[in-house]
Amino acid sequence: MPEENGKVIEFKPRKKKKLRSVNYVSAEKKALLRQREQQRKKQNDRLGTIKAVGVFFLICIVFYILSALR
């Protein structure tokens, strides 16, 4: 049978069609994810504040030392 007359479909017996998964997230899981995200944001804000205060103190100490040397 020549290929000109029809389309040749490759047969793969080990490949099974996979069922599509439903993108459903329960309300409890959504609440937990929201809570975790809020905690992560609060933690990042705390770290940012601590870093900013540390840099401020470092700058103050440097200026104090420079003014004391003069």
Image (cartoon, rainbow, N blue to C red):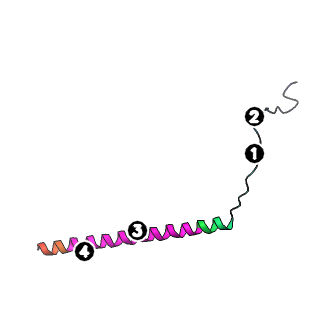
- Which disc is residue 18 wearing? 1
Residue 7 is left or right of residue 28, and the answer is right
Residue 54 is left or right of residue 17, and the answer is left
Labels 4 and 1: the sequence-earlier one:
1
Residue drawn at x 24%, y 74% is: 60
Disc 2 to disc 3, C-alpha distance: 53 Å
Indicate whether residue 47 is drawn in magenta: yes
Query: Which amino acid type is marked by label 1?
Result: Lys
The mark lying in front, picked from 4 and 1, is: 1
Disc 3 to disc 4, C-alpha distance: 20 Å
Query: Which amino acid type is marked by label 3?
Result: Leu
Residue drawn at x 40%, y 69% is: 48
Q: Which residues are magenta?
A: 34-63
Q: Where, quadrant-wise, is the C terminus in this rendering?
A: bottom left
**Residues packed near mark 2 inside 10 Å, few (<14), some (14 to 19) or many (20 plus):** few
Q: Disc 2 designates what residue?
A: 14
